[in-house]
């Protein structure tokens, strides 16, 4: 199957002209490229929806959402279904407050009576003074406890 110049013929055994190997692999490369592009786009869409869902904070029936929790920001102290929020005078008292809430043994009332825990109406406005791990120091900016400072669990800050 050599022609006059002793060059290999460009025809295969069936008589059809063979395409160079780079042309044969083009459809396969195109299919792989499009498949990978589809996977990347799909992954981006999934990540977008997952992070979008995670960044939306749970809201209650009246539409309250968690506020940006940076020092200096105005927030509300809020617990769904409660009339009042308890604010501890210091970090140690906050630990005792959490223990007393869990124990339900009268220690909570003793903390309130001692003045180390004050109560404010649910939804009271406050300003973040300091952030700790899982806890936030706030300054009350409305109501009869205005300008009082204390610590609350981070989850109570909206």
Image: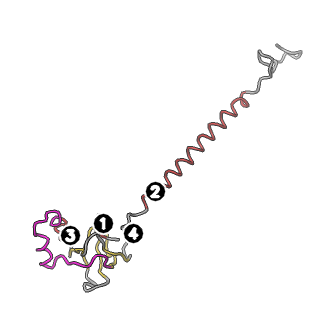
| Mark 1 lies on residue | 155
Q: In which quarter of the image is the N terminus?
A: top right
Labels 3 and 2: the sequence-earlier one: 2
Q: In which quarter of the image is residue 76?
A: bottom left
- Relative to residue 16, is residue 79 drawn left or right? left
Q: Position of residue 50 (x, y in %)?
A: 46, 54
| Mark 3 lies on residue | 94
Q: Is residue 143 above or below residue 27?
A: below
Q: Distance between the residues labelled 3 and 1?
A: 13 Å
Labels 4 and 2: the sequence-earlier one: 2
The answer to whether mark 2 and mark 1 are in CB contact below 8 A is no
- Relative to residue 42, is residue 73 drawn left or right? left
The disc at residue 65 is 4
What span is in magenta?
99-124
Q: How far apart are marks 2 and 1 (CA)?
A: 20 Å
Q: Neighbour class for label 3 at 10 Å: few (<14), some, many (≥20)?
A: many
Q: Neighbour class for label 4 at 10 Å: few (<14), some, many (≥20)?
A: few
Q: Quadrant of the C terminus?
A: bottom left
Q: Where is residue 144 in the image (x, y as percent from the top left)?
A: 25, 86
- Relative to residue 62, is residue 146 drawn left or right? left
């Amino acid at each position: 199957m050599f022609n006059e110049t002793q060059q290999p013929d460009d025809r295969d055994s069936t008589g059809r002209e063979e395409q160079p190997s780079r042309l044969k692999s083009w459809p396969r490369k195109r299919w792989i490229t499009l498949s990978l592009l589809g996977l990347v786009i799909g992954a981006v869409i999934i990540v977008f929806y997952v992070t979008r869902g995670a960044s939306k904070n749970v809201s209650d029936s009246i539409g309250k959402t968690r506020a940006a929790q940076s020092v200096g920001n105005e927030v509300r102290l809020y617990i769904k279904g409660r009339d009042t929020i308890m604010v501890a005078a210091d970090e140690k008292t906050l630990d005792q407050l959490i223990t007393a809430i869990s124990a339900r043994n009268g220690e909570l009332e003793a903390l309130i009576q001692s003045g180390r825990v004050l109560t404010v109406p649910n939804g009271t406005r406050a300003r973040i003074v300091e952030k700790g791990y899982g806890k936030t120091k706030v300054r009350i900016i409305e109501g009869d406890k205005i300008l009082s400072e204390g610590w609350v669990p981070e989850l109570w800050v909206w």
